[in-house]
Amino acid sequence: MNTLDIELEQGKVEYRPGETITGITKWQCMERPDKIELRLIWYTRGKGDEDIGLVDTITFDGPALYDTHKFQFTLPTGPYSFSGKLISLLWAIELVIEPSEDCKRIEITVSPTGKEIVLKT
Amino acid sequence: MILAKDNPFRVSQVKQIRYQHESQSWDQLLQRLEDMKYYGAIVGPCGSGKTTLLEDLQIHLHEIHVSTQYIFVSMDVRPSRSEIQNTLSQPADVVLLDGADHFSRRTWQNLKNRIMKVGRGLVVTSHKPDLLPTWVRCQPSPQRFIEITEQLLRSIDQHPFDSIFLEHLFFQHKGNIRDALRALYDIMASGI
């Protein structure tokens, strides 16, 4: 079984738009992967069809069986993390191994306060 | 109020529930389809799992190295002639056509003849049983709806609906499991 990990600096998961995310990613694979990607994404969850936005990607071509890398992403100005009855918008950093498509995902929040905005009716 | 990301009936959770045939295993279903020369229809009413079954079929066919091309047609999504031609020009052993009964008779006949002519298989979903020989008939049951609901509620470790209510909801939505699950989403979102 492949082991994947993402560690954010100081365990921080609340961010403001435009802020920089730094951390370390590690993997240990059973077979040599073709490619490993670290992605900064947002996606929706809820009653309707899901949307996903790929904001930034760091590609590790020809990766070793096991390795550790520092990474850095700069967040855009939006969209903000929010949740209501019908839809939630979530941010995440995910590490994906190809071709197995094993994935490790950690959620973060992005908003002017760093907290998820809750829509109340 | 339960937030969308935590609602047990959110689309991402519902999509993880796969089609389960009442009596036949996937090996048996694939054998039957092979006996039918990969030429058959998944027939059933709205929200009965036809698309889910067709998606699962694609995965199972790839596992046995049968290549496929997938075409989706609905009331809202109509691929253009060039899009269909482009899809059919790609090499594939079997064409999977989701929503075949949304085509006009003439378009359907032309498409079917074209696929038959080149010796490819064709598996379609349809509300009507008269397009191709029936491979699987999807017949939703209240019991299956209750099972799906129980499975989805495991993520929140609650069971706020009794089976009489769920059965009533199933019939209220005329056996359309997709719509009944959407109704449960709304109930959970409103707070119960």
Image (tube, rainbow, N blue to C red):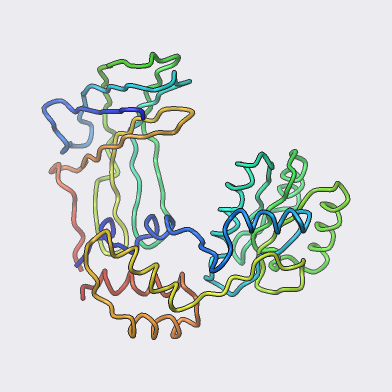
Front residue of B32/B68: it is B32
Name which residue lies at 23% across and 61% down: B156
A117 in relation to A30, above or below: below
- Number of labels in the image equals 0
- Quarter holding the C terminus of chain A is bottom left
Name which residue lies at 72% across and 50% down: B95
Residue A46 drawn at (x, y percent) = 34, 59
- Quadrant of the rendered structure where residue B12 is? bottom left
- Quarter holding the N terminus of chain A is top left
Front residue of B166/B99: it is B166
Q: Going by the image, does B63 lie left or right of B107?
A: left
Residue B31 drawn at (x, y percent) = 69, 54
Front residue of A35/B166: it is B166
Front residue of B163/A104: it is B163
Residue B83 drawn at (x, y percent) = 71, 47
Name which residue lies at 25% across and 58% down: B6
Q: Going by the image, does B74 lie left or right of A9?
A: right
Q: Going by the image, does A72 lie left or right of A103?
A: left
Name which residue lies at 73% across and 48% down: B94
B81 in relation to A33, above or below: below
- Quadrant of the rendered structure where residue A67 is? top left
Residue B146 drawn at (x, y percent) = 38, 74
